[in-house]
Amino acid sequence: WSRDAWSIDRKVRALCGRLPAFTFAGGTRVQILAAVPGTGSAADAPPGTVVDASPKAGITVACGGGGVLIITRLQLNRGKGLPMVAADALNGFQDLVGSGRVLRGQAA
């Protein structure tokens, strides 16, 4: 998550389908299947911090350089392990991807 949102977005799009980009929320692997760079700023949040999580907008994560990446589709290795939109992830796994949580590891 130390890279800028545009670089992470390009990596997510390039790897989707073959070997999805991933990160970790606690001990749970989170595959990022779709994301878009956001227009907001998260200069005061450390990279990897979920700064906003709403069913309509998606899961907004702080990136290096103060930018944000909005995760819109993901897959967890919990539950049934099926791909889901951000709203479904927030409904069932708020403890993992809710506001204030920190994503660590591969940095997408």
Image (tube, rainbow, N blue to C red):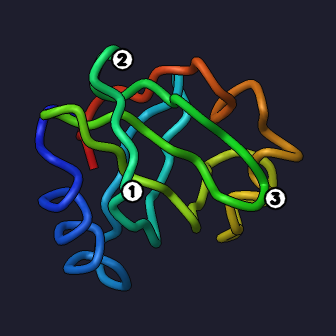
Left or right position of 60 against 69: right
What numbered label is drawn on residue 45?
Answer: 2
Which tag, 1 or 2, sits closer to the chain's start?
1
Between the C-alphas of marks 2 and 3, the distance is 25 Å
Q: Circle 3: is it few (<14), some (14-19), or many (20+) Cα within 10 Å?
A: some
- Callout 1 amino acid: Gly
The answer to whether the residue labelled 1 contacts the one labelled 2, judged by CB atoms less than 8 Å apart, is no
Q: Residue furthest right?
A: 91
Instruction: Look at mark 1 in the image and give the residue it sits on.
Output: 38
Instruction: Look at mark 3 in the image and give the residue it sits on.
Output: 88
- In the displayed structure, 38 sits above or below 82; it is above
- Secondary structure at numbered mark 1: loop
Q: Residue furthest bottom?
A: 17
Q: Circle 2: is it few (<14), some (14-19), or many (20+) Cα within 10 Å?
A: some
Q: Nearer the viewer, residue 28 or 103?
A: 103
Q: To which quarter of the image does residue 82 belong? A: bottom right
User: Which of the two discs, 2 and 3, sits closer to the camera?
Assistant: 2
- Secondary structure at numbered mark 2: loop
Between the C-alphas of marks 3 and 1, the distance is 20 Å
- Callout 2 amino acid: Ala
Residue at point 34%, 37% (across, down): 41
